[in-house]
């Protein structure tokens, strides 16, 4: 009995000491939490000074693009990419050296979203996905800091809500994770990731599940081409979409620090298996404050509506 009492007393003292240690070091009890306000302030500082940010009314980045498709078919192609923005207007356009997959274009003119055809009369799976989930483009989410329309430059709760969602380690880098919910309803789960040290925006994840009754994408997955069809196999399983943007190779451009490598990944999981699409864009030239006509953000004029 005496030994039991001594052991119990020892355990009690250990618990008390541990409690005092936790109180003196609250970071042990809970991971460091950062407010939305602090994130926004430090993130904008990671891009540039207030004067530099205010001075840039428009932005354009040009470079090379490589597309890789994996799934029921595998293929790849190369081409060029142009990212242009002015205020809340935004456009991403890729042109490939492939007759079956010629274009990947999407634009927002400040009011309406347009998505071009990958080839005559047919949209790609990426284009169809953006078209259905147009808030990703209208709210200035897609493209991140490579656009003057970037949502976090002029964040407003009227458009969407940011919420701290903890920390996550990806590729051995500690990141802050913030969920983002667009207003007026959205079936998409969106999450932003920021380097914990620099506060640079390095990743955005988009996830959506579409019920089986809405059908699935079909077409030529080896070229990123998709159409929509509802058939028996579509009714038997739901379709899961995951899109990831990655930003890296940050370098100075026009007084701002911007990513020069932009990667886009789209994964589609159906009852027939998984199809994955990769786009890697290497940006080599930047231009600022060039005036653009609003029509240049309507991509239907380039490759069809």
Image (tube, rainbow, N blue to C red):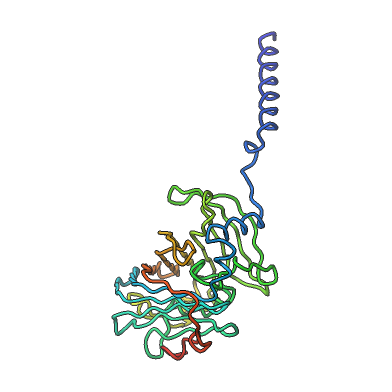
For the N terminus, the quadrant is top right
Nearer to me, 54 or 263:
54
Judged from this view, the residue extending furthest toward the top is 2
Residue drawn 53% across and 50% down? 196
Image coords of residue 76 (percent x, y): 29, 72
Nearer to me, 89 or 220:
89
Q: Is residue 93 left or right of residue 35?
A: left
Nearer to me, 241 or 139:
139
Q: Is residue 195 above or below residue 100?
A: above
Image coords of residue 261 (percent x, y): 39, 64
Q: Is residue 180 left or right of residue 274?
A: right
Nearer to me, 279 or 89:
89
Q: Is residue 108 above or below residue 145?
A: below
Q: Residue 199 is drawn in which quadrant? A: bottom right
Q: Is residue 205 above or below residue 15?
A: below
Q: Is residue 233 visible?
A: no
Q: Is residue 96 visible?
A: yes
Image coords of residue 271 (percent x, y): 44, 69
Residue drawn 45% across and 85% down? 116
Q: Residue 126 is drawn in which quadrant? A: bottom left
Residue drawn 48% across and 59% down? 202
Image coords of residue 47 (percent x, y): 52, 61
């Amino acid at each position: 009995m005496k030994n039991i009492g001594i052991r119990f007393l020892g355990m009690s003292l250990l618990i008390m000491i541990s409690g005092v240690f936790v109180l003196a070091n609250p970071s042990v009890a809970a991971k460091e939490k950062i407010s939305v306000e602090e994130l926004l302030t430090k993130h904008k500082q990671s891009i540039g000074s207030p004067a530099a940010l205010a001075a840039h009314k428009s932005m354009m980045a040009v470079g090379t693009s490589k597309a890789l498709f994996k799934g029921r078919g595998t293929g790849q192609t190369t081409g060029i990419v142009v990212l242009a923005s002015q205020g809340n207007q935004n456009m991403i356009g890729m042109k490939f050296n492939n007759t079956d997959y010629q274009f990947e274009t999407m634009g927002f003119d400040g009011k309406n979203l347009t998505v071009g055809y990958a080839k005559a009369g047919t949209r790609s799976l990426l284009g169809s996905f953006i078209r259905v989930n147009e808030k990703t483009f209208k709210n200035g989410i897609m493209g991140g800091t490579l656009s003057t329309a970037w949502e976090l430059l002029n964040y407003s709760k009227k458009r969407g809500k940011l919420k701290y969602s903890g920390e996550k380690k990806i590729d051995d880098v500690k990141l802050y994770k913030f969920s983002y919910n667009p207003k007026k309803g959205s079936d998409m789960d969106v999450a932003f990731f920021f380097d914990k040290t620099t506060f640079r925006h390095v990743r955005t994840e988009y996830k959506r599940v579409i019920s089986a009754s809405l059908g699935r994408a079909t077409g030529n997955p080896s070229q990123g081409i998709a159409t929509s069809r509802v058939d028996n196999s579509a009714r038997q399983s739901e379709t899961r979409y995951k899109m990831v943007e990655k930003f890296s190779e940050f370098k100075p451009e026009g007084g701002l620090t911007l990513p020069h490598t932009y990667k886009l990944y789209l994964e589609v999981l159906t009852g027939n298996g998984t199809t994955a699409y990769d786009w890697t864009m290497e940006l080599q030239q930047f231009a600022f404050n060039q005036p653009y006509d609003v029509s240049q953000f309507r991509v239907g004029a380039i490759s069809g509506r």
